[in-house]
Image (cartoon, rainbow, N blue to C red):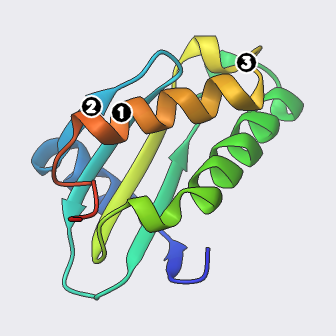
Amino acid sequence: MKNTISLKENHEFRRLYHRGTSSAGRHLVLYCRKNKLGRNRLGLTVSAKLGKAVQRNRVKRLFREAYRLHENEFARGIDIVLVARSRAVGATYLEIEKSLLRALRENPSAAARS
């Protein structure tokens, strides 16, 4: 995540949920919105309803790694929030990656211009 920093503030997450564009895959929902920073900010949300801390942290690690490996496919200067769905808990890395790429293709404001 060379050009990406973490999105941490609650009001920034809420702004993305309300004003950002969204697209969904089987295992996640991707929200994104332009920022004026020139670099991406990534936020991850995994509800406590999805399992205990070990399972939630595993999902976050898989999301982070899938994003890291495909970071160059995302547009520059956007805020991104990945929200885990219940299917993400038992999913393999390949399933998470496929879901992220599908959500990226469906969301034109998140995809990098070629």
Q: Outermost residue toward the right?
A: 54
Q: Is there a contact, CB below 8 Å, between mark 2 and mark 1? A: yes
Mark 2: amino acid:
Ser
**First in sequence: mark 1 or mark 3?**
3
Mark 1 to mark 3: distance in Å? 16 Å
The C terminus lies in quadrant: bottom left
Give the x, y percent position of residue 40.
39, 74
* Lateral position of residue 82 relative to residue 108, left or right: right
Q: Closer to the N terminus: mark 2 or mark 1?
A: 2
Which of the pair 12/40 is nearer the observer?
A: 40
The quarter holding residue 78 reads bottom left
Q: Which residue is mark 1?
A: 103
**Distance in Å between CA atoms under marks 2 and 3:** 19 Å
Q: Residue under label 2, please give it.
A: 23
Observer-nearest of 76 and 14: 76
Compared to residue 103, the image places residue 68 above or below, namely: below
On the question of residue 91 being in view, the answer is: yes
Say which amino acid is labelled 1.
Ala
Q: Which residue is mark 3?
A: 91
Q: Which label's residue is closer to the chain start, 2 or 3?
A: 2
The answer, for residue 8, to whether it is visible in the render is no
